[in-house]
Image (spheres, rainbow, N blue to C red):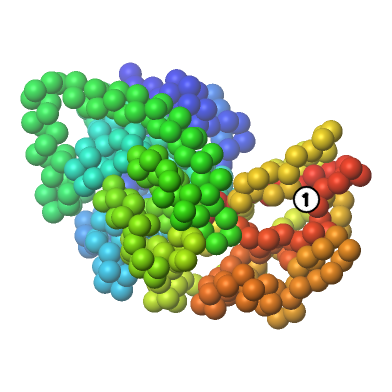
């Protein structure tokens, strides 16, 4: 009888006190995972909530799937939420494929519901076959080393932990398990067609590979895990190198050009990830960036989702197309709570994930050199903080003696483009800017020999 508990424990996917949002479509994979969670909850103290997302694509068939999920949750006394989204209209407006638009709206619904319910993890039912198909899909469309590693059992996105407990369970094992327990499931008609690239891999390529070797799925996944170990070492080296050539203005072009192309490709990919611009970026995109850095000033290359990389006089810069930026909804300011000692806190905004941690200062504290991490004397931060965009009257303290500079003047001096200034995120206290994420921080919060409590702040582009 199937059990994924061992995999959950091996990968540390769950711990007591977790709140988990489980995406259930009614298909075999998600129904299997729901029943596996019922077993897992006997051993790990977690809170579970089911979500079903109707994409607005399949009409009555989709409604029936939703009814099936509702009946199943009622049977199991499991709380659930049904959410409807309009994928066709969204894709037409945003210029996305149906597959990509459905995935984007589905995850947005996941994040919104997890936030509403106060849950910290999101579980999806991706299985071993999905992972093998993903690796092949990445190879076919062109990928770097990362694309060959497949999916991760656990990852972070928009401040939430995504877990995939079935990642080492095959589709055959899932269906056998459901037959053993006499549990029915729904079949999505779109999965039976070859309209999508992944379905062609599933229905045409994988069967041929399994004719050659019945363990093709296992072997592809084993190769992905082996490549993953290598990739983690490569990625760590790339991040270290990135710190030496990146700054407030972008990547130092002269230094970047001196780096061997293979390593430079990994650095460019790591840079895009840090800026939240790596989604759907392929090997072909990175190759074009490698060519771009040797072109004349002003040349640019367009990446997926409205990002543009442009050559400056001295730096390679990442921008967002104005037409794309206008589509982004306005964000409200986010209040940051007061912290006690040894406390961690994370929050997620549009385009930005931030993590805070307080700790007692150690001897000979060193300032971090990373552009995405800072430490502050928490004793000097009197009162509440907030993360927001700029407003009139904002200023930085630019010298230990208390001299100030208006934020507007700072942006002008640092040549921050006008179209980008209103979208820059900052950690503030009143009108005083503590840190402009990725740029400068005020001088009067720096740690010194008298610092007792430290506030660590780290951010990622999502």
Which residue appears farthest toward the right when viewing the image? 450
Q: Horizontal and vertical percent for residue 165?
A: 41, 32
Q: Horizontal and vertical percent for residue 365?
A: 79, 38
- Of 154 and 375, which appears nearest the observer? 375
Which quarter of the figure has residue 43?
top right
How many C-alpha atoms fall within 10 Å of the one at disc 1: few (<14), some, or many (≥20)? many
User: Could you tell me which residue is drawn at 48 percent across and 22 percent down?
Assistant: 10
Q: Is residue 172 visible?
A: yes
- Of 110 and 433, which appears nearest the observer? 433
Q: Horizontal and vertical percent for residue 460?
A: 55, 51
Quadrant occupied by the N terminus: top left
Q: How many labels sit on residues? A: 1
Residue annotated with mark 1 = 376
User: Could you tell me which residue is drawn at 74 percent across and 66 percent down?
Assistant: 433
Q: Is residue 286 above or below residue 295?
A: above
Q: Is residue 89 visible?
A: no
Give the secondary structure at mark 1.
strand
Q: Is residue 445 above or below residue 404?
A: above
Which quarter of the figure has residue 221?
top left
Q: Is residue 304 above or below residue 206?
A: below
Q: Horizontal and vertical percent for residue 8?
A: 46, 27
Which quarter of the figure has residue 5?
top left
- Of 206 and 295, which appears nearest the observer? 295
User: Could you tell me which residue is drawn at 54 percent across and 78 percent down?
Assistant: 418
- Of 396 and 178, which appears nearest the observer? 396
User: Could you tell me which residue is drawn at 50 percent across and 23 percent down?
Assistant: 9
């Amino acid at each position: 009888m199937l059990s994924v508990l061992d995999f959950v424990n091996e990968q540390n996917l769950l711990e007591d006190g977790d709140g988990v949002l489980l995406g259930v479509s009614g298909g075999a994979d998600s129904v299997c995972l729901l029943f596996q969670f019922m077993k897992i909850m006997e051993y790990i103290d977690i809170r579970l909530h089911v979500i079903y997302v109707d994409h607005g694509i399949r009409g009555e068939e989709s409604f029936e799937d939703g009814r099936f999920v509702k009946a199943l949750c009622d049977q199991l006394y499991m709380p659930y939420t049904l959410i409807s989204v309009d994928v066709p209209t969204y894709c037409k407006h945003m210029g996305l494929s149906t597959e990509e638009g459905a995935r984007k709206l589905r995850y947005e619904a996941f994040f919104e519901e997890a936030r509403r319910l106060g849950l910290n993890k999101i579980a999806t039912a991706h299985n071993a076959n999905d992972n093998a198909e993903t690796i092949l899909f990445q190879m076919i469309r062109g990928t770097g080393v990362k694309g060959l590693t497949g999916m991760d059992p656990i990852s972070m996105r928009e401040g939430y932990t995504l877990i995939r407990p079935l990642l080492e369970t095959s589709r055959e094992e899932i269906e056998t398990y459901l037959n053993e327990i006499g549990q029915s499931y729904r079949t999505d008609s779109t999965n039976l067609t070859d309209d999508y690239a992944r379905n062609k891999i599933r229905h045409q390529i994988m069967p041929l590979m399994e004719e050659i070797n019945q363990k093709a799925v296992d072997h592809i996944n084993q190769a992905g895990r082996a490549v993953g170990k290598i990739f983690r070492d490569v990625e760590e080296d790339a991040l270290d190198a990135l710190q030496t050539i990146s700054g407030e203005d972008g990547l130092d072009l002269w230094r970047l050009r001196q780096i061997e192309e293979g390593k430079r490709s990994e650095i460019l990919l790591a840079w895009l990830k840090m800026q939240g611009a790596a989604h759907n970026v392929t090997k072909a995109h990175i190759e074009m960036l490698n060519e771009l850095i040797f072109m004349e000033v002003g040349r640019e290359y367009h990446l997926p989702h409205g990002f543009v990389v442009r050559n400056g006089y001295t730096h390679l810069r990442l921008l967002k197309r104005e037409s794309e930026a206008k589509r982004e909804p306005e964000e409200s300011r986010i209040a940051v709570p007061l912290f006690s000692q040894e406390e961690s806190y994370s929050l997620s905004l549009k385009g930005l994930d931030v993590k805070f941690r307080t700790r007692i200062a150690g001897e000979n504290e060193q300032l971090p050199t990373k552009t995405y991490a800072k430490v502050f004397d928490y004793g000097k931060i009197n009162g509440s903080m907030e993360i927001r965009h700029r407003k009139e009257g904002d200023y930085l303290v630019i010298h230990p003696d208390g001299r100030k500079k208006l934020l507007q003047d700072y942006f002008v001096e640092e040549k921050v483009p006008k179209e980008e200034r209103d979208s820059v995120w900052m950690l503030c206290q009143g009108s005083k800017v503590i840190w402009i994420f990725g740029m400068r921080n005020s001088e009067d919060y720096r740690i010194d020999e008298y610092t007792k409590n430290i506030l660590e702040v780290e951010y990622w582009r999502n």
